[in-house]
Image (spheres, rainbow, N blue to C red):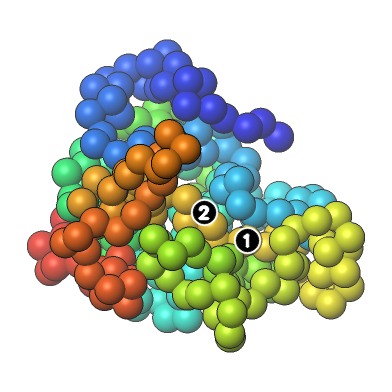
Amino acid sequence: MRLWTDSSNRAFIAKHYPKYLRMFDSYNLHIKRVDAVRYFLLFHFGGVYMDADFACVRDLDTMPIRERSGAAILILQRKSYVDHEAVSNAWMAAPPRHPFFALVIKSLAASANASHVLDATGPRFLTRVWRAWAQSDGHAQRRARDLSPSSSEAINYTVSLNFEPWALLHRVHSCRPSTIPGPPCTGRYNYQPCKRGKDDELDRCAITMPNVSVTTFWTNTWAQDYYLSKGYLKLENTSSGTLKVVRATKTKSAKELAGLAAKKPSAKQQTG
């Protein structure tokens, strides 16, 4: 297992995919680089990618990933396949140089300037690419192979999208500061089956969810940076000389901001 940092991410792109470095550097939000590099890393090395707010309830070897030669595995973060952000980019698995992730990489430039990060590099972007792959009936695989010249034609490359019981990706939320839109820290939305992810809590979680290997806490740390860039939040000096994040005067209510974050992309964005 390796934890990638901002500096190692950029060095990796510069060394192995220099033609994409300009795009990588040009992203106007840090989270776009964080999103994009995971696709390159998974294409290059293969294996399992998961966000830092995931926790293993059991060893990853309990997942039947190795049994599926040539398969990239994606999981739903919504209840419906037709949802515009159905596919999660927070947990993904694939063998090295899988043509699907070659297609994902080739599709990044066209979405780089999308107004919302979810459309540029996040789940909405990945959902669009997955749909293009699914609808291409193999054509997308052939188009993607110029980035993957070492791929063997003997491998039957597939993409599996399902809600396996061993890969729990449920819509749960951790507490939100008052400046960040989202469910409050009380009530039915604050449901965390594995609590805060401490060792004893994960041990209890393993007992109550015997078929689950990983869980997520959905911290959404990118949201503050995004809303600051849009002017809905601002930094303000405190009496102690530190900075704090507050709502900008032009901002909307928390409910309206939450709706903005989940706003369905335009038809142009959906087909981009």
Helix or strand or loop: what does disc 1 sit on? strand
Q: Is residue 126 visible?
A: no
Figure disc tally: 2
Q: Nearer the viewer, residue 129 or 13?
A: 13
Left or right: where 148 falls relative to 5: left
- Amino acid type, callout 1: Thr
**Residue 87 rendering spot, x and y as whole percentages:** 43, 64
Q: Earlier in the sequence, mark 1 or mark 2?
A: 2
Q: Residues within 10 Å of mark 2 (few under 14, many from 20)?
A: many
Q: Residues within 10 Å of mark 1 (few under 14, many from 20)?
A: many
- Amino acid type, callout 2: Ala
**Residue 83 rendering spot, x and y as whole percentages:** 35, 76
Q: Which residue is mark 2?
A: 90
* Extreme-bottom residue of the structure: 188
Q: Residue at x 82, y 69 (%)?
A: 205
**Residue 262 quadrant:** bottom left
Closer to the observer: label 1 or label 2? Answer: 1
* Extreme-front residue of the structure: 239
Helix or strand or loop: what does disc 2 sit on? strand
